[in-house]
Image (tube, helix red, strand yellow):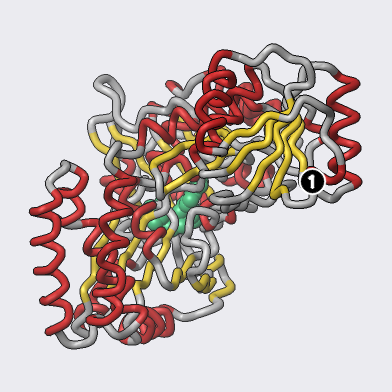
């Protein structure tokens, strides 16, 4: 982060504005909205019509005053900030030099290298204000981000924030604990009260808020709640909105080794993050211990997010965690995620079912103690289906042998897909009989799936060659051609 976003109180303060053209007019509007008094130095520029109008109105109430001389050190003495918006390069540099010497923070419009502070693109739903900066690198991109955010935020957001503010003291008085208040506000913003206010019906909003508040004040101290959240296969863009909401509410996040830092970035800033990672072979915490940890945090009144790769109910032991929560009498909500097989299929244009090739999709685990995993091999060897094996890299050769022994043709297409949906993703394709060698030569180190079936031939050839070029392992290119 090259710049620190901060929000400056300007009400009743003076800001120096150098220049009177269009750029100055734009800044003047924001300064006036923020309640600043403005001293304007036109530096010989003809005032933009908006500036002229503000000067005329400001002459009456003293909010905008004009100085027809260059800015000097004495002007800076009582100024909070200065903005240099004058066109002329020499005038601009001279003004910046004077202001710098007087230690007044300066923004020089369109001259990023002269700026002490930058103006963000602004989304104004006061009192909610959002500033977006690209640190001067791509202002147009910052404005596009602003447009996206604008379109996401309900128009009544400012009204809602102001409404909530009016109840703050009452909530503080009636709900004694910090965690209780947080829970109250979450329910408030999720519930009927907020919906009514956003719809412009403040009377109904007030009624619903009082009802919620009275119920909360009468109730026993809240216990926490648990979300079992699927974080998808790795690409943060594949998080569901519901996952994101839970992650934003969390007091504590217990996460797996498969959860990358890009995903953790979406967790609420001040939530506690606890890795409970289970990596192949090296269990850092047993399942019992994880269950106990979830229950202990929730019993302490916290909102617990158990964040798991893919989907929590697919080879994620989410079922056991849910049972532990239920046994402890805790609320538990399951948030599904995009499972690795779906992420991998999409990433490589590989349809998992196909009218002509695969009417069945089997999702199986390859985890085994020693030999081949205990699976229904005659069923899995049959044609007309796709078999996706999770946790199967270590047993790839034995899996291929078992399928062939039960009648699968040796040349049935197979793929190994590693780190699907992440920038490091790779796919290797070949014949079933070569699956063991494929895995070995590829030196798979990330999470990987085996995909077996005719549909492998349908993977997007462009995606295959593109990944081949990017693939680090020397065997990859050859395997790809197979
Ligand atoms: N609940 C998870 C699966 C957890 S089991 C889900 O629904 O996806 C762990 C196995 O998932 C790994 O051994 C690997 O086979 C698979 N896996 C998880 N993420 C993957 C990814 N990004 N690419 C390929 N395989 C992945």
In the image, the residue with mark 1 has its CB under 8 Å from the nearest atom of ligand 1: no
Toward which corner of the image does residue 349 lie, by quadrant?
top left
The residue positioned 44% from the left and 30% from the top of the image is 148
In this view of the protein, which residue sits in the foreground, 263 or 424? Answer: 263
> Residue lying farthest front?
60
In this orientation, does residue 433 appear? no
In this orientation, does residue 264 appear? yes
Drawn side of residue 203 relative to residue 82, left or right: left
Which element carries disc 1, helix, strand or loop?
Answer: helix
Drawn side of residue 251 relative to residue 49, left or right: left
Query: Which residue position holds label 1?
Result: 76
Q: Is residue 190 above or below residue 359?
A: below
The residue positioned 54% from the left and 25% from the top of the image is 54
**Local crowd size for mark 1, using a 10 Å CA cut-off: few (<14), some (14–19), many (≥20):** many
Quarter occupied by the C terminus: top right
Toward which corner of the image does residue 182 lie, by quadrant?
bottom left
Drawn side of residue 375 relative to residue 44, left or right: left
Q: Is residue 126 above or below residue 227?
A: above
Toward which corner of the image does residue 58 lie, by quadrant?
top right
In this view of the protein, which residue sits in the foreground, 96 or 64? Answer: 64
The residue positioned 46% from the left and 30% from the top of the image is 413
In this view of the protein, which residue sits in the foreground, 274 or 412? Answer: 274
x and y percent of residue 2 in the render? 74, 47
The image shows a total of numbered marks equal to 1
x and y percent of residue 350 in the render? 42, 28
Q: Is residue 373 above or below residue 225?
A: above
């Amino acid at each position: 982060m090259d710049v620190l976003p901060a929000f400056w109180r300007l009400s009743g303060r003076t800001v120096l504005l150098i220049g009177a053209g269009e750029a100055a007019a734009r800044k003047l509007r924001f300064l006036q909205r923020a309640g600043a008094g403005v001293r304007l130095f036109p530096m010989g520029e003809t005032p933009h019509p908006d500036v002229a109008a503000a000067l005329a109105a400001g002459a009456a109430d003293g909010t905008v005053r004009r100085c027809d001389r260059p800015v000097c050190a004495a002007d800076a003495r009582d100024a909070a900030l200065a903005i240099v918006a004058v066109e002329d390069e020499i005038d601009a540099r001279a003004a910046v030099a004077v202001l710098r010497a007087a230690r007044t923070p300066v923004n020089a419009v369109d001259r990023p290298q002269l700026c002490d502070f930058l103006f963000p693109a602004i989304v104004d739903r006061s009192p909610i204000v959002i500033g977006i900066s690209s640190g001067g690198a791509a202002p147009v991109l910052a404005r596009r981000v602003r447009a996206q955010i604008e379109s996401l935020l309900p128009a009544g957001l400012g009204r809602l924030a102001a409404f909530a503010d009016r109840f703050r003291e009452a909530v503080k008085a009636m709900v004694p604990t910090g965690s209780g208040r947080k829970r109250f506000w979450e329910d408030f913003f999720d519930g009927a009260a907020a919906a009514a206010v956003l719809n412009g019906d403040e009377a109904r909003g007030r009624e619903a808020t009082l009802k919620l508040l009275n119920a909360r004040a009468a109730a026993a101290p809240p216990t926490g709640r648990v979300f079992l959240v699927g974080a998808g296969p790795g690409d943060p863009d594949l998080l569901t909105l519901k996952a994101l909401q839970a992650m934003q509410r969390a007091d504590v996040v217990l996460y797996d080794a498969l959860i990358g830092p890009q995903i953790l970035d979406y967790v609420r800033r001040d939530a506690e993050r606890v890795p409970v990672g289970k990596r192949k072979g090296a269990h850092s915490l047993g399942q019992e211990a994880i269950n106990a940890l979830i229950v202990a945090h929730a019993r302490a009144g916290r909102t617990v997010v158990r964040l798991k790769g893919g989907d929590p109910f697919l080879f994620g032991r989410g079922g056991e965690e849910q049972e532990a929560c239920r046994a402890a009498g805790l609320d538990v909500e399951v948030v599904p995620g995009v499972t690795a097989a779906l992420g991998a299929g999409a990433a490589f244009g590989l349809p998992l079912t196909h009218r002509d090739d695969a009417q069945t999709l089997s999702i199986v685990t390859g985890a085994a103690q020693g030999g081949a995993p205990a699976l229904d091999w005659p069923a899995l060897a049959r044609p007309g289906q796709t078999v996706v094996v999770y946790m199967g890299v270590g047993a790839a050769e034995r899996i291929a042998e078992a399928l062939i022994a039960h009648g699968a043709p040796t040349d049935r297409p197979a793929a190994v897909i590693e780190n699907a949906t992440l920038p490091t993703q790779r796919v290797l394709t070949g014949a079933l009989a070569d699956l063991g060698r494929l895995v070995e030569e590829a030196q798979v180190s990330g999470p990987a799936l085996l995909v077996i079936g005719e549909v492998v031939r349908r993977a997007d050839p462009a995606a295959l060659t593109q990944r081949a070029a990017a693939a680090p392992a020397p065997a990859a290119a050859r395997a790809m051609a197979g």
